[in-house]
């Protein structure tokens, strides 16, 4: 196929199709509406089904129904619409159904605006809906990485029978970059012998539900889920480090903000400041290992976010008091500039701008 120039929302959609997703239920909301429109055109070409639901609540419950049959299914939204999906997402977790849910984050709270933000971090990493649960969350920083992580999201969903969140900001959804869709490497995944595909008169019917009225039985189910979350934490951590080997200070950023931060680091390096980057790719499970490896030798960390300060809490937990943790953020849809991040580096490190 070679390289093609595409918009981020459309890259997510095409990557999902190439990962074997043939069912999509969604509702348009800026800045992710192009994803819905692309699926409406593309899925009939591969024998799939697109349905624009009457609401985000309806869409996530349609995902529940399709996921119960074992097919690869996806839905997408942006922050206010994603909030409406939370009950259905909790149902997916409780029923152990695989699906991919995309959130292209915009400024909030409330209706906010349609500008990019990362202020749904708490919502995606700390549960979001009701009950004790976690969901794997992948945060790409480029459109090419979207191709790879969308495919991985479906594999993780099938491997653990869980919904997986793919989260980007409005800028990532709207930007255009050249991408290449290569041959997919097939993963060894468990058989979906739990799927409700019908007995055809042979065998007992399969029942999928999150309802359990007996308290002890529900506790047993919850303990099994917690064991599964522990396996995910053990096996599905993803992160990237940049120039951390000799760093005195380490920046922490994800998504498009990490790209801006990397440019600021390069400028700081030119001025002789030893600064590096830890980029979480999985927001949950959060990558604690690079902090454990660096926290006793660095002078401090700086979390850079498009929020009022959310990921910084996980950074502080990982550092556990071994070093100072500072924060720089913009909110409401404002994107921090490379120069702002560079000036923050100067302030924290005591460097001198030249």
Image (tube, rainbow, N blue to C red):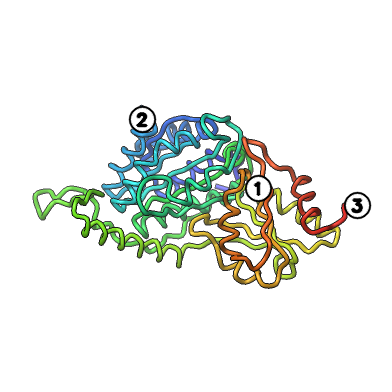
Element at label 2: loop
Looking at the image, do the residues carrying marks 2 and 3 touch, with CB atoms under 8 Å apart?
Answer: no
Q: Is residue 133 left or right of residue 7?
A: left
Rounded to the nearest angstrom, the CA distance separating label 1 from label 3 is: 24 Å
Q: Is residue 19 above or below residue 273?
A: above
Please identify, in this view, whether the residue under mark 1 or under mark 2 is nearer the observer.
1
Depth check: give the residue in front, 192 or 121: 121
- In this image, 292 relative to 19: left or right? right
Residue position for label 1: 257
Nearer-N-terminus badge (1/3):
1
Q: From the image, tell me which residue sits under label 3.
A: 354
The residue nearer to you, when weighing 341 against 205, is 341
| 183 sits to left or right of 240 | left
**At numbered mark 3, what does the secondary structure look like: helix, strand or loop?**
loop
Q: Position of residue 140 (x, y in %)?
A: 56, 50
**In front: 181, or 7?**
7
In the picture as drawn, the residue positioned furthest to the top comes out as 54
| Labels 1 and 2: the sequence-earlier one | 2
Q: Position of residue 323 (x, y in %)?
A: 67, 66
Callout count: 3
Q: Tell me residue 310's x, y (percent).
A: 57, 49
User: Disc 1, disc 2: CB below 8 Å?
Assistant: no
How many residues crowd around disc 1 within 10 Å: few (fewer than 14), some, or many (20 or more)?
A: many
Q: Residue at x 63, y 39 (%)?
A: 331
Q: Is residue 319 above or below residue 333?
A: below
- Disc number placed over residue 109 in the picture, else none: none
Q: Horizontal and vertical percent for residue 232?
A: 42, 62
**CA gap, disc 2 and disc 3:** 56 Å
Res 53 label: 2
Q: Nearer the viewer, residue 16 or 163?
A: 163
What crowding class fits label 2: few (fewer than 14 Cα within 10 Å), some (14-19), or many (20 or more)? some
């Amino acid at each position: 196929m070679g390289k093609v120039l595409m918009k981020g929302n459309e890259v997510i959609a095409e990557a999902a199709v190439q990962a074997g997703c043939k069912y999509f239920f969604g509702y348009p909301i800026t800045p992710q509406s192009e994803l819905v429109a692309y699926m409406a055109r593309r899925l009939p070409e591969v024998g799939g089904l697109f349905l624009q639901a009457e609401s985000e609540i309806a869409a996530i419950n349609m995902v529940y129904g399709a996921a119960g049959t074992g097919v690869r299914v996806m839905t997408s939204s942006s922050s206010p619409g994603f909030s409406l999906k939370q009950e259905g997402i909790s149902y997916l977790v409780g029923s152990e159904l695989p699906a991919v849910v995309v959130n292209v984050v915009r400024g909030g709270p409330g209706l906010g605006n349609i500008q990019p933000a990362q202020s749904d971090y708490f919502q995606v990493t700390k549960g979001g809906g009701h009950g004790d649960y976690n969901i794997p969350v992948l945060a790409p920083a480029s459109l090419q990485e979207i191709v790879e992580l969308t495919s991985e999201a479906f594999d993780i969903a099938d491997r653990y029978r869980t919904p997986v969140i793919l989260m980007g900001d409005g800028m990532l959804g709207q930007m255009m970059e050249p991408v290449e869709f290569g041959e997919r490497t097939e993963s060894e995944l468990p058989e979906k012998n739990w799927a409700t595909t019908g007995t055809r008169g042979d065998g007992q019917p399969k029942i999928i539900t999150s309802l359990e009225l007996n308290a002890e039985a529900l506790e047993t189910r919850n303990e099994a889920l917690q064991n599964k979350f522990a396996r995910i934490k053990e096996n599905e951590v993803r992160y990237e480090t940049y120039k951390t080997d000799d760093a005195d200070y380490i920046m922490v950023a994800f998504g498009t903000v990490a790209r801006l931060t990397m440019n600021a680091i390069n400028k700081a390096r030119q001025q002789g400041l030893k600064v590096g980057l830890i980029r979480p790719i999985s927001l949950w499970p959060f990558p604690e290992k690079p902090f454990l490896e660096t926290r006793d030798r660095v002078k401090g960390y700086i979390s850079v976010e498009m929020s009022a300060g959310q990921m910084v809490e996980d950074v502080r937990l990982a550092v556990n008091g071994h070093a100072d943790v500072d924060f720089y953020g913009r909110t409401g849809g404002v994107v921090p500039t490379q120069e702002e991040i560079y000036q923050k580096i100067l302030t924290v490190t005591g460097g001198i701008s030249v």
